[in-house]
Image: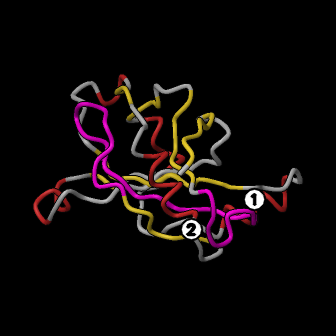
Amino acid sequence: MIRTTLQAGAIAAAVLLLAAGPAAAQTTRKVAPERLPYYWVLTNSSVEADVPNTGKNLDQPGCVAVTYLIGSDGRTQNVVAAKTVPEGDLAQVGASAVKNFRYGPTGVNRAAEPVSTYYVVGFNLPEDPARKAAILKQCALPGYQTT
């Protein structure tokens, strides 16, 4: 296992949270990644991730949609790799990066209310913006508030 540091801005974006349980699922707002900055702001400038030495599709362009809950303390909880494209061993890398995210509440969220969201971690993405967007779009998850 190799420990590597990923730049938060370079980790191709998107965030999804998984509720902490049945009770939390009823009261926790599900927020789409593009709406998350209205509630929480990522405070890390970089994060570490566990990257295996070998594995399936580690060198292929792809993405991992990682769902999680941002708790009232700004830490991620219930981190789950919900979707991986292509299938392979990038799921554990994406989840390990998101586990290290830290957030601060925004002015709209002064009470620091938890939200569920997801983040799309991109790997080995092409430089071409259209090809990059097409890969990342495959990891979009339905069911999150977009307005």
Q: Amino acid at mark 2?
A: Asp
Q: Which picture quadrant has residue 110?
A: top left
Left or right of 132 in this view: 56: left
Q: Residues within 10 Å of mark 1 (few under 14, many from 20)?
A: some
| Disc number for residue 89 | 2
Q: Which mark is residue 133?
A: 1
**Nearer the camera: disc 2 or disc 1:** 2
Earlier along the polypeptide chain: callout 2 or callout 1? 2
Position in image of residue 47 (x %, y %): 52, 34
For mark 2, give the secondary structure: loop
Closer to the camera, 104 or 147? Answer: 104
Residue 77 magenta-drawn? Answer: yes
Q: Residue at x 38, y 35 (%)?
A: 39
106 vs 127: above or below:
above
Find the magenta span and give its range.
53-79
Horizontally, is 19 left or right of 66 in the view?
A: left
Q: Kindly state the secondary structure of the residue where label 1 is placed.
A: helix
Mark-to-mark CA distance, 2 and 1: 21 Å
The amino acid marked with disc number 1 is Ala
Task: Evaluate if marks 2 and 1 touch, with contact meaning CB atoms under 8 Å apart.
Answer: no
